[in-house]
Amino acid sequence: MNHELKVKKYARYTDDFVIIAQDPVYLNSLIGPIQEFLNTKLKLALHPRKVTIRKHSQGIDFLGYVILPHYQILRARTRKRMWRKMRSKMAELEEGRINQKTFNACVQSYLGVLSHGSGFNLSQQLKNEFSSLKFDF
């Protein structure tokens, strides 16, 4: 990114990356060279539905969060998956398939994820949902 294309503002984590620029024409012009590099050097391809050019006010969907100019929130799909998994873990706890310690570890894991964004209200909801159980919040 930096050496070949001279992109100034970008973020990368494993196989995910985001490029930030003012000019949508410039961003469109990068797609071809990036596809070429990924295909020839790494034998990878861009996912056609995951390449988007958006205004910063719409937020950047990156690593499970939507990053907005002054805060970041958990992606709606990630939030729904979190609630679905927590209810599933609660059922496993009630059936005796997992113990309290394992369930607590799951809750703590999600609280950790929520701490990286503007997830205070969501973490409070999570704590309240399972407040009948004793946790180390």
Image (cartoon, helix red, strand yellow):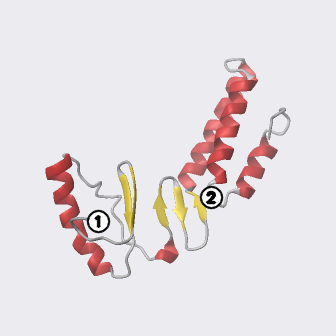
In what element is the residue under mark 2? loop
Kindly identify the amino acid type of the residue bearing the numbered disc 2. Answer: Gly
Instruction: Look at 35% across and 49% down and name the residue there.
Output: 15
Q: Which of the labelled discs sits on residue 2, or is there none?
A: 1
Residue drawn 55% across and 49% down? 78
Residue depth check, mark 2 versus mark 1: number of the one nearer the observer: 1
Relative to 32, is 110 on the left or the right?
Answer: right
Q: SS of the residue at dot 1?
A: loop
Where 28 falls versus 101 (above or below)? below
Q: Which quadrant of the figure contains the N terminus?
A: bottom left
In the image, 38 versus 131, the foreground residue is 38
Residue 106, horizontal then vertical, whole percent = 66, 34
Amino acid residing under circle 1: Asn
Q: How many marks?
A: 2
Q: Residue at x 53, y 65 (%)?
A: 67
Earlier along the polypeptide chain: callout 2 or callout 1?
Answer: 1
> Does residue 36 appear left or right of residue 94 in this picture?
left
- Identified at 37% across, 58% down, the residue is 17
Q: Position of residue 131 (x, y in %)?
A: 83, 39
Q: Quadrant of residue 96?
A: top right
Which residue corresponds to mark 2? 117
- Image position, residue 120 (x, y; %): 73, 57
Point out the residue furthest to the top here: 96
Q: From the viewer's perspective, is 37 left or right of 94? A: left
Q: Residues within 10 Å of mark 1 (few under 14, many from 20)?
A: few
